[in-house]
Amino acid sequence: MRTGCRLRSLLVVMAVLLGAGCTGGRSLPEGTPSSYAVYYGDRPLYQRLDQYDWVIVPDTVAPERHSRTRFFAYLSIGEVDQGGKMEKALQKQLGQKGFRKVVLDKNQVWHSWVSDMRNPVYSRLLRERIARDVRSGFGGIFFDTVDSPLEYRRVHPGQSRGLKTALVRFIQTIHRDYPGIKLILNRGFEILPAVAPDLSGVLFEDFCSRYDDQSHRYLRVSEADRESGLAWIRRARRIHPGLVALSLDYGDPKDRPLKEKCRKMAFDAGLIPYFSDRNLYETP
């Protein structure tokens, strides 16, 4: 996740168990996870992960084929890691000059490239990676970094014609080609209503508390920002009532009052919450 966190070689386990007390006695729609986790390490800790319904992992971690857990492969579709496998694949096929046409901007925080989904080579390489992940046994795909090209589009509307449509069509195409695979979108609220029928879940990162990279402090999310995101989710749920909403907040793990406040706010809004430090080093 690179709206507020980056895929790297680290261990993350995010878990929330929903009991009747947490859901206020409501019955959950069929297929709704009662728990979820995210693991970004390079060692498959299956005994730890098997207790969760949904687990998001890098696709270097092979999913357990006989586990009840549904494994989601992490996929950044709005950014390309500088020096990473996708950049190398693009440069191999397009050359340095062609690769620059895929780059919209640079993420100065993570030193990654904001990427252009309109480029057919880039979208094809992403589809090929998804095909490999599905063959490897993944039951879901987690789409990250969508906010980056959407933000570029807001700042540079004249250079971004068709960019939003390309992002929407990419997600719709994946759902069409893999109807049995569950898809989760990290934020991307601007396109959420358009792709809601194609998704199983949406992750609301920075729902209650966030990490500010400039001040290097945890800050409360404003009510206006939170309500703006929730309004998009409510709109998407009118289109797809079974859409699962997850929240992710950042703060000092020792700050139990803030953790409990964010947890309660998420439950009250109908989201499955998780709270961790900025690097997601926390384990349950």
Image: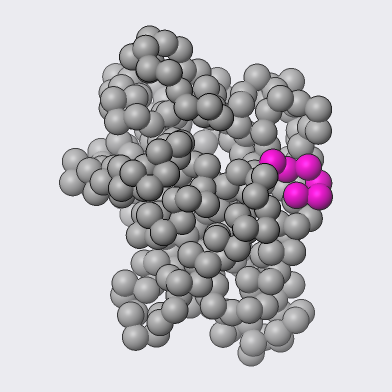
Is residue 195 found left or right of 211 in the rendered image? right
Q: Is 206 colored magenta in this rendering?
A: no
Which residue appears at 60% of the width and 32% of the height? 54
Depth check, front residue: 189 or 156: 189
Which residue appears at 53% of the width and 67% of the height? 169
The relative height of residue 56 versus residue 267 in the rendered view (above or below) is below
Q: Is residue 154 visible?
A: yes
Q: Which residues are magenta?
A: 134-139
Residue 80 in the image: state x and y as whole percent.
59, 66
Q: Is residue 222 visible?
A: no
Is residue 38 found left or right of 135 in the rendered image? left
Quadrant into which the C terminus falls: top right
**Picture quadrant of residue 38:** top right
Is residue 282 found left or right of 237 in the rendered image? right
Residue 101 in the image: state x and y as whole percent.
56, 85
Q: Report the number of numbered marks.
A: 0
Depth check, front residue: 82 or 191: 191
Residue 223 in the image: state x and y as whole percent.
19, 41
**Picture quadrant of residue 208:** top left
